[in-house]
Image: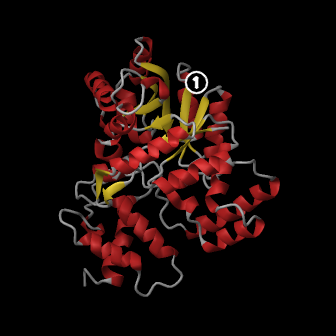
Amino acid sequence: MTNLGFGMMRLPILDENDFTSIDYEQVNQMVDLYMENGFNYFDTAYIYHGNMGEIAFRKCVAERYPRESFKIATKLPLFVITEESQLEPIFAEQLENCGVDYFDYYMLHNVSGFTETAWKNVDLYSFIQRKKEEGYIKHIGLSTHGNAEFLEEILFEHPELEFVLLQINYLDWDDEGIESRKCFEVAKKYDKQVMVMEPYKGGFLADVPEEAEKIMKEYNPDKSVVSWAMRFVANLDVCVVLTGASTLEQLENNIYEIKNADPLNDDEIKILEEVSEIINSNITVDCTKCRYCVDTCTEEIDIAKLFDLYNKHKMLEKDDWTQFGNAYLNYSKLPDVGIASDCIECENCLEECPQQINIPEVLKDVAKTFETEIYGFNQ
């Protein structure tokens, strides 16, 4: 059975407008349930939850379980690195944040065109290789949202890498922009272990359009929408599937689904192709809510939240007075937050978006939809 990874990018929070307000009590319950079911792989990162992701791991795992009982993976934050002198202090901080004296898996975070300032100007590969030799890292690798050609160049030049973390799901498998299948094939060509992120594509595949769900249910009424997504990735030749559960119930479902992830047959694969076409025709913004853009926004716009509301609004067939428009209005009344029309088009966010979304342009339509058409903010 493929290992289910406990992703710590979307933990439950106490205040929906404060991503650092982690609900530690619920996370503890989730960790306990996860460990009781025989899983032990935790994935976090320096920047998750407003730089609280690694600390959450320490509080909920490292301080509550013996070191030999879990595996911890984290990532060197290429987004903030401009010179070599930063590497040692950040690495030392990460060890302290996580409450461990070594990492089981350590990767360069999102090696792609968005982080080229770091990997072009700083010898990151020698650094992580040295840390492995010193015993601070067991296995070194990278995460990437780059295309297959880009990944092949890296793996050819750096045979010391042992694994790659890739965005893989049935929607992105043959997508010409994401190239999940091609990236997977490149990793296997170089005999690298593959770990999966975004198996539900930021929640899109857990809440598909009614037309798509109907097709799935007609074929097999006993299988949930989520199970189709899990079965797709769990039966690939991968070692870990990361899911970022935000509630105890979501984690329970993930555990159940991976334990019951029987292989897809030919008919089911064809159905997923049809479902993918339906989903793609309904998705307005291909955002996975990774929140990298939010951390760089000078106007304090919660871009991921606004895109989520915008997508849900657009998927409604009839929307004279929308619950999502109301949610936007409530958000706009919060202190110290930016709304879509506050965007100054600085384009900082463009450098951070793994999905290559033209964020400033989309924010214009978000503003038009919610602020002008529904509430007339700007009239």
Q: Is residue 177 shown to the viewer in this render?
A: no
Q: Nearer the viewer, residue 263 or 236?
A: 263
Residue at the image position 28 percent from the left and 74 percent from the top = 330
Left or right: residue 368 versus residue 312 is left
Image quarter (top left, top right, bottom left or bottom right) of the N terminus: top right
Task: Residue lying at the far left in this picture: please name it.
Answer: 335
Image quarter (top left, top right, bottom left or bottom right) of the C terminus: bottom left
Q: How far across and how far down the image is residue 317, in percent?
A: 54, 82
Q: How far across and how far down the image is residue 74, in percent?
A: 42, 33
Residue underneath mark 1 = 156
Please name the amino acid that badge 1 sits on.
Phe
Quadrant position of residue 185: top right
Q: 352 above or below 105? A: below
Residue at the image position 37 percent from the left and 37 percent from the top = 57
Residue at the image position 44 percent from the left and 38 percent from the top = 110
Q: Is residue 195 shown to the viewer in this render?
A: yes
Q: Nearer the viewer, residue 308 or 60?
A: 60
Question: What color scheme is it?
Answer: secondary structure
Quadrant position of residue 309: bottom left
Q: 63 above or below 242? A: above
Q: Nearer the viewer, residue 354 or 201?
A: 201
The image shows a total of numbered marks equal to: 1
